[in-house]
Amino acid sequence: MTAATTALAERVLAIGTVTAPYSLPTGELLSSYFDEYRIAADPELLARTGQALAALLPADVDVVAGLELGGVPFALAVSAATGLPAALVRKTARPYGARLQVEGRPRTGARVAMIDDVIRSGRQITVSASALRQAGTLPIAAVAVIVRPGNARALLRAHDITVSGVVDETQAPARPGQGPT
């Protein structure tokens, strides 16, 4: 990791970490969490984060896909930084309108990097990868602002999806007080 990337990672964590109770869908209560919207709401920091995420993309990616909802602003920032087209992936298809789960119409056969705010278990990535496959694309990578300790790498490796993050807590000790969101 370069000094600039390390400084960006430290800034993202300093701005995005909120020390307040946070309830996970499992019911687990955390004492702190990462608020991706604090990063996304800062145009300069969002652009720098998009550039850092872009640097993690495999060379053969054709499309970046933002995962609902936290990954959307980061995927758009990566698209702006790289010129790659973006797609947006909903957790479920809309029950009205065009009833799409994947928006942006990525071309058939496109190699896709899924962009998210935080990856921990990898479950949402597998749901999104399935939707992208049904749309005719090939999801090959999951890239996030933060990769937390969890089962994501093993789960996604079984689907031939690589995992990387600007902040990768699986490669270094977690900061004190950091929760698994």
Image (spheres, grey):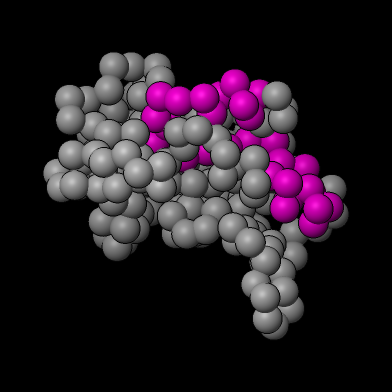
Q: Residue at x 52, y 25 (%)?
A: 151
- The magenta region covers 129-157
Q: Horizontal placement of 30 versus 91: left or right?
A: left
Location of residue 124 with respect to 91 vertically, above or below: above
173 sits to left or right of 94: left
Residue 151, compared with residue 109, is above or below; it is: above
Residue 169: horizontal and vertical position, in percent? 36, 24
User: Can residue 12 be seen at all in this image of the molecule?
Assistant: no
Residue occupying the far bottom of the picture: 97
Q: Which quadrant would the C terminus be assigned to in this image?
A: top left
Q: Residue at x 25, y 48 (%)?
A: 22
Quarter containing the N terminus: top left
| Rendered residue at 14%/44% (across/down) | 19
> In the visual, does 127 lie left or right of 3?
right
Residue 55 or residue 165, whichever sits in front: 165
**Residue found at the far left of this picture:** 19
Which corner quadrant of the image does residue 165 belong to? Answer: top left
Residue 154 percent across, percent down from the top left: 59, 21
